[in-house]
Amino acid sequence: MKQLGSVNDFLGIHIDRLPDQYFLSQELYVASILQQAQMLECKALANPTVTKLPPELLPDPILSDPSMYRRITGSLQYLTLTRPDIAFSINQLSQHMHDPNPEHVYLLKRLLRYIKGTIDYGIPITKSNLDLSSFSDADWAGDPHTRKSTSGFCSFLGNTLISWTVKKQHTVARSSTESEYRSLAALASDVIWLRRLLSEFGLPPTQPTDMHCDNTSAIALANNPVFHVRTKHIEIDQKFIRDHIQQQNVRLLPISTIDQIADIFTKPLSTPRFHQLRLKLTVMQRPINLR
């Protein structure tokens, strides 16, 4: 082993140092992706997704090639290490690697135009408290073809975002409560792992981890030991969360939909709403004194 001094770049991630924080970004990596797609000079967009597709989709001479679509989308997956704001878009594009349609090519092009305008964005690691808090959300039956829901959740250590996930659920949920509850169960599993990891670092959590959910029915179900016919099929998830609530590992708290940060991981959003949640997610432009 060799002491190579302070880290500046690690596996394509550029690390800037400030007195009270680190800033992680992948500007050179983004530029290489745009160069592959021949979009270094494209016009930037403010939002990587759309709530409604245009009536006519024009083919792209480069991205319409399935092999190029797969190559670019695969490269973008690595970009989510410092860009959680594009995690939902990447998740949607990755589901159609085998046979991309014109609408998927259109969405990929939109995403590339978005990252062109945010090429120097990234996430900070700041000095703050070591309180772990998490947010969970789900888009019930959001997939128009399979009617499966999308789970999205993230965790903060103090003010620093340390974990995030976007994933399509394996089974079709029968209600919004079920889809939200499955997302909560997945988050609870991730939170328990993070708590064990902190303990291994010699920083065992002293308080239950707050998990925020905007579905009051899901919260009530987690705290209600009585089952009825409509909830028997999620009994295992219910008991898993309830056990950890009783062990004081986690605590479920209600949160308004407006303040639900995980909303950015589950569905396309309007541009003002997207920018609002991107800021809460701590995705930001590189500080001026580092440019």
Image (cartoon, rainbow, N blue to C red):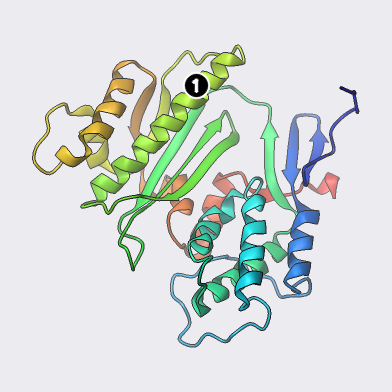
Camera sees residue 114:
no
State whether residue 236 is above or below residue 229. above
**Residue 106: x percent and y percent?**
56, 76
Name the residue carrying label 1. 195
The reply to whether residue 196 is visible in this rendering is yes
Could you tell me which residue is drawn at 58 percent across and 56 percent down?
A: 86
Residue nearest the viewer, comparing 224 with 10: 10
The amino acid type found where label 1 is placed reads Arg
Relative to 159, is 248 above or below? above
Residue 174 position within the rendered picture, expressed as x and y whole percent measured from the top left: 21, 52
- Residue 222 lies in what quarter of the image? top left
- Residue 94 vs residue 217, the one in the foreground: 94
Residue 104 lies, in percent from the top left, at 52, 72
- Residue at the spot 35% in from the left edge and 25% down from the top edge: 251
Left or right side of 90 for 171: left
Q: Residue at x 50, y 76 (%)?
A: 101
